[in-house]
Amino acid sequence: MVIKKNHAILLEKLLRDEEKQLPYTTLEKADELTARELEFMGLVRFSAPLKMILTYVGRDLAHLLRELYKMGPQPFAEKEEEVSGNIVIREARGIRPPEEWEEDFRFLGSEIIAMLESADLAGRVGPEGIEPLMVRGLAARVYDKERKKEYVILTKQGKLASEIYRNAEPNLEIDATLADVIRKLPIGPAESSRLTASDHEKHLLEGMRLIAYSVPKSEIYAFTALGQAVKKALSAGGYGEGIVLSRDILISLADYLDTQKITESALSILQSLGYIGPQGELLPAGEFAMEAFRLIKDRPQGLAVAFDIEKDEIDVLKAIRDLWTKAHNNPEEQPTFENLKKEMVKRKSAEYKLLKDKYGEKFEEIVEEYRDIAKNFFYATDLTSWYIENFDLRAFLHSLESFNLIRSEKNEKGKEVFVLTEYGKKVLEDEAEHVSAPAVKAITTPRKAFAAPNLEWYELAQKEGLIGTAGPSRRGNLYADLAEKVYRLPFLTKYEHAVFSLIPEKGITLPEIYALLKNEMPIWKITYAVRKLEARRLIEVLPDGNVVETEAGKLLDRALLSVPKGVGFPVTPIIVRVLQALRNVGTLYVKEQKVRILPRNVAEAKRISGLSDEIFAEAMQVARLFGYL
């Protein structure tokens, strides 16, 4: 949905004609391109070829705009002593009439919608959305007398605008000319300057929700999940004259696949456009078209998933791989914990010796994240002690297992060893140094919603090699796929738990998290923890800078209530595997809401877990201590 000057003027005209009890507005009295754009957004419909009327949501939007015109752009405030409730408006405003708008001013657009939806989800406006939404009269600065706190929330008009967007039924109608435009455009995310189409074509694509722009200033665009499906369908088929893809064509295709009963002429159209083959089989273009139809009906919703892996974790993955290679000739070289520790001491010592040779005692020139470690290495006399004090190998192993990149198993001697999963092998084949959660979200956001990533995520993705000039790289697609497919097991480090415990279900922003923790840990460590929490699907960082808990995060909050404060790992993949195994051999007592396990079944649980006897026993003990058992 995109509302600019011409759209707002036409909506007001249609509303006035309706109030005059005119049955319709003729197309001759309006700009045809603007009218067609509003039609594609689901705000206007044609009762006859040249006769326009407002839809229900179009009428609601016209009334909303009129309210804002009446309020005017001058800021106003309430007097605290005159307000009986808790919330006092400290700054709010309306907008100028559309005739006074700049030509390129976007009252609504996909970037504004993303801010509205983020604010609605978080219960307040995030830092990226404050100025854009307040200027449009969609947000107001308020003071909460009970909490003694000032923040920005959506106004009545802001909430209504978000509701109008959700309720609108955009059209899908692509002719041969627009199809050619879609085929040529980069899929994105890409800089908006690469969107080489006319303004009218851009408005049609955005109105049909095939593309979206980034928060806050539309610097980046991307084809949405629906847009990607449409683009793939039109790249594989849809070659013809006139309308080559529309809702009616999709309905006809769905009917054919469901019942095989459509008219000969309808089947002929589907075959001529390359959606159905000569023998009645579904062609690749038809498969993508049906994916588009599913997205139109279901509307993509949910978490823009992330994935995060740091250099130290990749180094451990490499060591596991190399130890298994050595173990082919000498089984004693298998990657047990002790063998891994020896290998990592050797590798990290060599790595930090290079830093020592390069910088000497100029520690301030070393990246902050590695500065203290390098300083400790410079004066270290025992390298094993240096490694143990500066690196947490067990944390790296837990984190890798939590993302299903490795698995703790027992070898033929019953000892714990670490095995690479297929996902872990793919990560090593890629040879990335590190991949961050925001960078991966630059790719997964358009896949999951009618939205584009914000600028910061896009720039990180470019820096990390996940995005090229026109769209995701091979690496980007790999990590986006991992983010969507990997089965995660819960894990928290001490630092991640400290950050996680500060985050309520909703109502906190990234700057507030940094402010609350700046005296407890360095900025880079807070950033590290936030990214890991998001990659673990416990929180979501919204495009406007708000942070909310996911459903999994809310459940983990409850699970951690019995865990003592300050423990190293409040929950680990190993503990979860033990709990899963015990549940499998136990009996659910519905009335008590408990699973009871007979002592004789614990041995079977140990077998199911796949863990060594020692690791299983340790995890059982910790699970009891933490109140999980």
Image (spheres, rainbow, N blue to C red):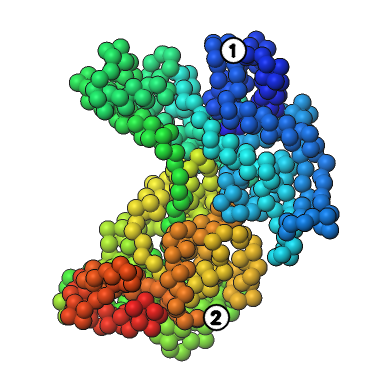
Q: CA distance from mark 1 to mark 2?
A: 76 Å
Spot occupied by residue 84 in the image (x, y as percentages of width and height)? 77, 56
Q: Secondary structure at mark 2?
A: helix
> At x 66% / y 48%, what residue is drawn?
154
Residue where numbered disc 2 is placed: 375
Instruction: Say what amino acid the circle numbered 1 marks.
Output: Lys
Above or below — where is 442 with respect to 549?
above
Above or below — where is 488 with respect to 268?
below
**Any part of residue 309 in sight:** yes
Q: Are marks 1 and 2 in contact (CB under 8 Å)?
A: no
591 or 133, which is in the foreground?
A: 591
Residue 360: quarter of image:
bottom right
Q: Residue furthest front?
A: 591
Q: Secondary structure at mark 1?
A: strand
Spot occupied by residue 163 in the image (x, y as percentages of width and height)? 58, 39
- Classify residue 334 as left or right of residue 305: left
> At x 59% / y 49%, what residue is drawn?
120
Q: Earlier in the sequence, mark 1 or mark 2?
A: 1
Residue where numbered disc 1 is placed: 51
Q: Which mark is residue 605?
A: none
